[in-house]
Amino acid sequence: MIPAKTRSTKECIVRDISRKVKSLRIATARSIVRVSPNTTELIKQGQIPKGDPLQVARVAAVQSAKGTSQIIPYCHPIPVEFVGVDFELTYNTIVTTTTVKAVYKTGVEMEALTAAAVAALTLYDMLKMLDNDMEITGVTLLSKKGGKSDFKQHCDEPLQAAVIVLSDSVAAGQKTDSSGKLIVERLSSEGVTVVDYLVIADDLETIEKTLLLCCDEMKLDLVVTTGGTGLSKRDCAPEAMARVLERQIPGITETARAYGQERTPYAMLSRSVAGVRGKTLIVSLPGSPGGVSDSLDALLPPLLHSFHIISGGGHHEHKKL
């Protein structure tokens, strides 16, 4: 046993999920209660003194799934949208399968597991007077989906990208760049190889020339710019991209703005644009580090799925549970 004076006194820290995006989360769990064959027969015949244990266990499972955060300390309150509870009676077992769904920022596996466990405990409570050898033999997570890892893209070859900082002051050496470096770091963490990092003036002709170089000559997979998306006279990134893009993808920047607007009322003022030229995806992001960080949180990793589509692949099908 560790002496009391050497034990850690660090406080428990609840995980911050405020920057995560919402997605459909689904989890399925199972619990098994081993009973005597006579007990299963009594259930089928409706002869349990306390009433129908399956219906009571179903209500208990639904209720516990919705209240998991009140039982498990690190679980966040989740707007549970569906709880399915199914029972299977075999010769000497009662198998409970629970499925929980929610559109939220964190998974629902604990809700599914809690529902399955509480269903088993409820069955135990209602049947214990009839079966002294009853046993809960296991609570298992069968599957979960909808988290960030489900949208992680795996490419045969690393994607090659360029990051372009559009700023008169940074190009003149009057300020240092942090937004562009943040993009480089985030892309690298997603397995994207950043082959070029450029700082240029916020000038229409210069931006257009640089974008054409990255797309037509370097033939990069991805070009991400930062800056030049505001309302000042020198902010001309959208106008430069309009000259270069062959097809716009409004949903990319709509998603980034919607995510940002939930965190700052100024996100709506961004004029960011995204689209493709040839097989190169171009995305313009705001110039502030906060705007860049919010945009990348909203777009990565699902944005990288676009390269599967651009190269001729189809959309991935996500099987429903």
Image (cartoon, grey):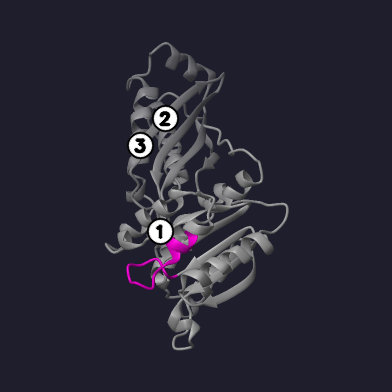
Q: Where residue 207 is drawn, which disc sits there?
A: none
**SS majority, magenta:** loop
Residue at point 56%, 33% (across, down): 319
Q: Where does residue 135 sit, x and y in percent of width and height?
A: 51, 34
Q: Amino acid at mark 2?
A: Gly
Along the polypeptide, which appears first: circle 3 or circle 1? 1
- Look at the image and say whether residue 76 sits in the magenta stretch: no
Q: Secondary structure at mark 3?
A: loop
The answer to whether residue 18 is seen in the rendering is yes
> Mark 1 vs mark 2: which is more N-terminal?
1
Q: Amino acid at mark 3?
A: Glu
Q: Residue furthest top?
A: 45
* Mark 3 surroundings: few (<14), some (14-19) or many (≥20) residues within 10 A: few
Give x and y (percent) for residue 208: 53, 66
Task: Report the disc number at residue 84.
Answer: 2
Report the residue marked by disc 1. Answer: 17
- Marks 1,2: beta carbons within 8 A: no
Dot in front, 2 or 3: 3
- Tell me the element at label 2: strand
In magenta, the rendered stretch is 227-241
Residue topped by disc 3: 81
**Front in this rendered view, residue 119 or 235:** 235
Query: What is the quadrant of residue 265 in the picture?
Result: bottom left
Residue at screen point 57% across, 65% down: 211
